[in-house]
Image (cartoon, coloured by chain):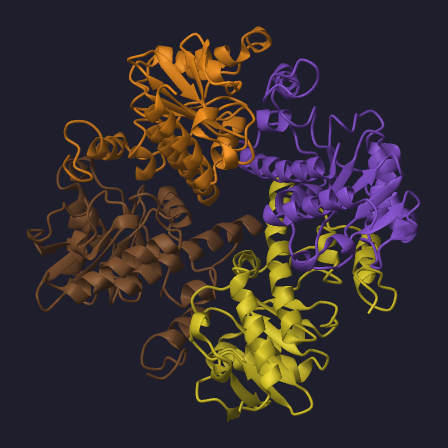
Chain colours: A orange, B purple, C yellow, D brown
């Protein structure tokens, strides 16, 4: 079995989505990439999490050609591949239909940064894609979903805004590793849920100031970060 | 004991409703049909799930005549029987008062298809019945509930729209088997919950396009489906 | 120890409130009455549920005079006593600050009967009391809470409407036994939660018809009931 | 190891936040003070709760100088220290990003006292701070957060109003001990959640009367309290 340790990370990221209540049945999928070998390991399509084993994961190259594994990969694989090819710095992708984040995607509204929980992870609102055209839906739908995300990030740094809401669909999240991608999926769900309650308590709620937003993001990221233990 | 394997499926479908938090106390009921023998197995009325055994299930014919079992069947049995007689392709029915789906039924509003989670399972909105007339409530209330559902499906294919909201009451779900019916009940609850949050985030939220809806439904259903493993 | 079996029922009713997530820390209280002896057993004040034992329950007469038990009774005892003295048919009372039901009490709005789940248990909306006057709050506050409930039930049958929302406070529930009272507390919380979602999905939602309401209530209560097993 | 019993209390308070679902991953922090020695024990920054040990807690003096422990303290330590220096009567502080309370902080709205659950713990609304100025954010941000809280309490008694919502951030809670601070964090989350539902059920909901508010607060606090067991 090739890429054993990547497979372990990917399996663990998928199971984290289950443990945190972000996926049910066979919903959702997480993947990871070995940049050195140009290979991606991803969850198989429609297989229950309860019985998923290391060897059930599917390894493909960046064009989606199967390299190892007898099962079909997640049907969202082409979206993952576009993200890996366009966002050079990412090492993992996680996709869920988690309740609150999916509802914002369905509402086709970006999630404003209402507080420091959000600012700790995202250097801006959580963006939403434009809807796909009928032609983009008809042919290469999943790859086109990836392209719509990439277009939305033309002026955004995917490592500073590690998730997107696909309009009418659900979130895609990413990070330097599969486990970071899954972690972002969990945080995003929490941020999305709190954003609903925020606009319920105050329909005119405003995002926090640029100053507070930057302060919190940079407290945790970049060379001047001072959250956590020195590494 | 006749129909042992159907009973096992029906018991399991009932317990799935409990495990997923869709029913409490003795709420809800699931049934299954043997088309070959024209017999239906259903949960008994008002018996706790914790202690329910295979032999507690009640087997009746399509007119509701008891064939095996000493307990009274669920009081909603006549609704199930109308569905089995009118929807030739279904093999199981599940009825719950799950929180979000019931609230839409109480609101007497169909659930619009706000996203692909919904589109993966329903080829259209989740419909709501018309309220029953006083006369329909007075006599044969449960059978008339079934008839109201069937009238609502005059122009709908029950295998492509596998659930309904009974106005002022709660959902009825179905599928090719008891376990599929229970599965739909779980999915419907999730879809209903996300639909609330969607209209909270955006009171003017619009359904997804017909193109996206069809794409997702057909990705999972019909001859061109490509979700899951080849069977 | 006197009234052992009543104590067991009362302890079990209190623990049911914990198991169903209706109370936290030392919130809430349930009691039961022996009509034959004119004695009430109730949860002690401020004692954690985790360690509560049969002998911790406090037995008092209908004037609140301690008969057995070394702990102080729940501070809401005078409310319970007024209910027992005024509602001859009840055998148990349960009081919680469960989230959704308390929110309706805080909103000082009765819960309309939006569906059959409600109609199965309450023959009308769940009523809300009038606020107490400053004088009623100052002296004998807890007994006056009971009197406000009784005044609200002047034209209502407490066995057909087994709960009330005390304005700005929380629900009191009752039944023929302590376990029935706890059961109603659980159901009321579910009904209250669904009612929120109902008005979210449809701010103009209307109660179900009198016909449907009566049908469901009488399907489960009274001489013509046909829900559950014959007893 | 110094301050062993304070460390035990502080560790226990931190774990209570986890058990009650108020924090996830390494979110949140609780601390305690030994007034006699002028030393504070606090959670280390960014360390998982699952593996946190007594010796991982960090002991500092009131200027934040490390006294014992090899890990970095929570980055919110300066906020805790300002609170200990300004609020002479408190012995513990707990900070979470719990969902509903954080949403009110994000909405920058105080939580009105809609009911007796709130009145039992807070002698007034739960206040919200003013946003920090750009300069206060740039330098000594965490200490300035503490100063903003203290300014907000100019006319409030912190022992009668044991929590605050920091605008655009989240709640800080306190009490006579670390465990009381954690207890208040749990109660505040519940109160905040019920307040959302209250304004959903009735957008014009009004706070309870001063009379009822005082009655409930004084039933549990002060010399005339009569809730719980005599101590």
Residue B136 vertical position relative to residue A164 in the rendered view, above or below: below
Residue B221 x, y percent position in the rendering: 68, 21
Residue B9 vertical position relative to residue D121 in the rendered view, above or below: above
Asked whether residue A112 is in view, the answer is no
Out of C214 and B23, give the one closest to the viewer.
B23
Out of B178 and D97, give the one closest to the viewer.
B178
Point out the image quarter for the C terminus of chain A: top left
Relative to D107, D76 lies left or right: left
Residue C66 vertical position relative to residue D104 in the rendered view, above or below: below
Asked whether residue B99 is in view, the answer is yes
Out of B103 and B97, give the one closest to the viewer.
B97
Residue situated furthest front in the rendering: A1
- The picture quadrant where one finds residue B197 is top right
Point out the image quarter for the N terminus of chain A: top left
The total number of labels drawn is: 0
- The picture quadrant where one finds residue A189 is top left
Q: Residue at x 16, y 57 (%)?
A: D41
Q: Residue at x 81, y 46 (%)?
A: B41
Residue C143 x, y percent position in the rendering: 55, 81
Q: Residue at x 22, y 34 (%)?
A: A220
Out of D58 and B205, give the one closest to the viewer.
D58
Relative to D183, D142 lies left or right: left
Residue D215 x, y percent position in the rendering: 43, 74
Relative to B147, C204 lies left or right: left
Residue C24 x, y percent position in the rendering: 45, 64
Relative to B48, D178 lies left or right: left
């Amino acid at each position: 079995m090739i890429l054993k340790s990547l497979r372990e990370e990917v399996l663990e990221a998928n199971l984290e989505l289950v443990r945190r209540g972000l996926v049910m049945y066979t919903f959702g999928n997480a993947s990871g990439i070995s940049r050195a070998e140009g290979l991606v390991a991803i969850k198989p399509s429609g297989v229950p999490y309860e019985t998923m084993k290391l060897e059930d994961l599917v390894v493909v190259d960046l064009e989606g050609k199967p390299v190892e594994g007898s099962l079909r990969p997640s049907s969202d694989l082409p979206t993952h591949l576009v993200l890996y090819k366009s966002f050079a710095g990412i090492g993992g992708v996680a996709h869920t239909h988690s309740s609150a984040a999916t509802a914002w995607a369905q509402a086709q509204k970006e999630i404003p940064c209402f507080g420091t929980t959000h600012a700790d992870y995202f250097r801006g609102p959580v963006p939403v894609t434009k809807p796909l055209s009928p032609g983009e839906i008809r042919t290469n739908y999943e790859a086109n979903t990836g392209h719509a995300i990439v277009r939305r990030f033309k002026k955004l740094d995917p490592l500073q805004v590690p998730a997107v809401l696909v309009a009418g669909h659900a979130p895609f999240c990413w990070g330097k590793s599969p486990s970071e991608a899954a972690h972002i999926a969990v945080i995003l769900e929490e941020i999305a849920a709190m954003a609903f309650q925020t606009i319920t308590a105050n329909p005119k709620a405003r995002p926090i100031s640029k100053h507070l937003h930057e302060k919190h993001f940079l407290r945790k990221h970049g060379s001047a970060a001072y959250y956590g233990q020195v590494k």
